[in-house]
Image: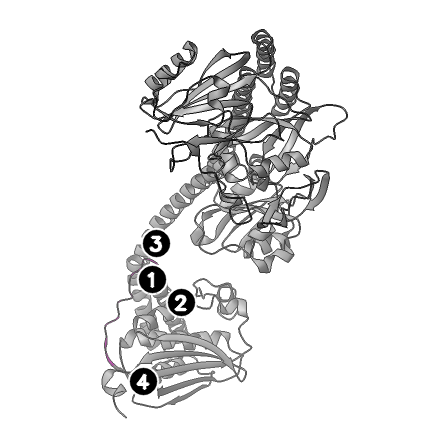
Amino acid sequence: MSSTPEPMAIPQRVDLLNCADEPIHLPGSIQPHGALFFLDSDGAVEGWSAHADTRLGLTLTLGRNYEQLGLPASVAELVHETFDTMHEGGAAPLVAAVVIGASEYDCVVHAHKGRVIVEFEAREESTDAVALFAIKAHGSIERLRRQKSIDGLLRTAVRQVREFTGFDRVMAYRFRGDDSGNVVAEARQDELVAYLGQRYPAGDIPPQARRLYVLNTLRMIADMTYDAVPLLGAPGAPALDMSYSVLRSVSPIHVEYLQNMGVAASMSVSIVINGRLWGLIACHHMSPKRVPYSIRMAADVLAQVIGSTVQSIESNDQAALVERNAKVRTSLVESLLLEEDPLEALVKHGEGLMASSQSQAMVVCQFERVVCLGIDQDAGERIVASLPADAHDLLLRKGVHDWPEQDRAALGKWVGLLGLPFDPPSSGWCLLLRTEQVENVAWGGRPEKSEQVGPMGARLTPRGSFDAWHETVRGCAHPWEDVILTHARLTLGELMRVSNARRAQTETTRAQLLAMLGHDLRDPLHSINMAGMVLEKTGGANNKGTLGRRIQSSSNRMQRMISQVLDMSRIDRGLSLGVALAPVDMAPLVEDMVEEARLAYPTIVYDLHTIGPAFVQGDDARLGQVVSNLLSNARHHGEPNQPIKIRLTVQDGMAEVCVSNAGAPIPPEAEATLFNPYKRSSLNNPRNRTGMGLGLYIAQQIVREHQGEIVYHHENGRVIFTVKLPLAPRQAAQP
């Protein structure tokens, strides 16, 4: 390589279109208080900062090996050691103090992406003065280790950093979940305006800057008015990645931002916990200022101590919370295993559940029953009504905008929700609620970015004023913490295990009951029925005959109930009802079922009109069951002394059976559950006290297995149920 060096490529001008993508790790220049050169993986010179050769007294030529540059022995040793380790995964930067001419430098050498970067940072303080600063810094570290709270830790940190660095203002900046941050501690000159308590929006630190804060935890700008020194390299050479460099030039947007704050020099030290940018120690000076590298490294060590101490404090707090939450879960599970009603167990442990989740209210529900703690019943029921029907994992709502739009106006103060769907089949939920946190935020200046049109078009302009700009934030609850979400997931798992165990036990009991119904009761009932028939025939018209008819009626009703329960069990288990298809004429079938009803209930008027024949492919016994159920439904729910109308028609290739009774329209909320089993309207019907609400449920399944449908509508003061069945192919083909 022997070509003439030229300035390396630099990023395009920052404007509205590319600000978020500005490659700040590839600035193509350095700050002027130092010089650098960089080598390829073979040790040959690839480039250098302008004037580095004259400033460092070196003869820099592209392609020349570093051993031929006449480097000070200590620097050559650092470079040699860096080459030895760079292929083994790299190592921390190596540092040596060197004197070149009349100037003292800190030489910092590191490897990155196959290159070795050698930086010389001019130092104003003597080596002895730096040593005294370092002693102060180590004393500060010991003070930090003794802190027991995060607030106390950060207050001590800013005082200590300001003491051993001499900055006019040192702030501890803590990030929030939305990447905005608050100034939570501050040490400053008395004449400076306080920034303590102010919040800065996430946009003040764009993603690429946040990335660099994590990679390179210390950054200094010695003079905001500096003129950047360009990097020189071979024509077309790839830009130098300066992510870990100490002399890296910074974004002009950031320089302008700090200048608007009146800052002439700055230093930032990242507080990184588990690979995440937790906070910053931000240092400002109102005049140019250089802090020696070793002192900055002491501040970096201090930030690492802060990070480990914060992590220790948070871990201890979380461990105590985890232990307390585990006790709540254990006690809750014990109660669930003993209590017959899961809601009673949840209510019994409501205070513990609310304390462990740091919530202010709780709502539990199952099978349409709602129990509220700390919230009025109407509000609790509205919240339950807003829940999704198919949730199987935690439901998290942090603020008003996480709720369905139609429910927001009625929320009141309850805007935070942590929902545990512990038994989805029965709509079983445990809901933990947090109230709205009305927050008065003091922003460090109006947080919106402003736009300004200049010679090259629109560009972003950093805020010119950093006076506190106050805003009231509404509609949000305190965010659900990670440790509480972990506790909620563990609690949900325990609740679901108990619910599944209960369900399995119930299924076993139900199977035993159904076996008894299907086998042990049917034969005795048949015998009772036969005895009733004999008693009716031998008793004639006297009391024995009447008693026989009553025995038959009661035993027939019990047999129908048993048949309904067995049918429902087959449906619930995903089994068909076992229809045997054959051509069936619906006209005589409907007539027979109506005639049977007339004989059983002679006081009721049955108004029947049929148009036949109407052949379908069906099971005559099951279709008769459908018609019988509709007649029974009309008889029990229709207005007394009003006829029941039955119509059989054929149209559009379908046989339609309509059964209607006089009555008011079914309310919309009841209409939605018409074909559900065990409906309240059926279970509480005084005219059918033994009904279980299974008739329409089973009828719908039978009709579906015949490829038909059953529908409800209300017309002319009558409740009408219509069964539609496809005609048999031969009849459907007739004109």
Q: Marks 2/1: CA distance?
A: 9 Å
Q: Marks 1/4: CA distance?
A: 28 Å
At mark 2, the secondary structure is: helix
Residue contact at pointers 2 and 1, CB within 8 angstroms: yes
Q: Marks 1/3: CA distance?
A: 16 Å
Return the residue at label 4: 653
Return the residue at label 1: 571
User: Quadrant location of residue 256?
Assistant: top right
Q: Indicate which disc, 2 or 1, sits on the residue closer to the N terminus.
A: 1
Count the labels in the image.
Answer: 4
Q: Residues within 10 Å of mark 1 (few under 14, many from 20)?
A: some
Q: Which mark is residue 697?
A: 2
Return the residue at label 3: 513
Q: Is residue 196 left or right of residue 388?
A: right
The amino acid on which the numbered mark 4 sits, given as a three-letter code, is Gly
Q: Indicate which disc, 1 or 4, sits on the residue closer to the N terminus.
A: 1
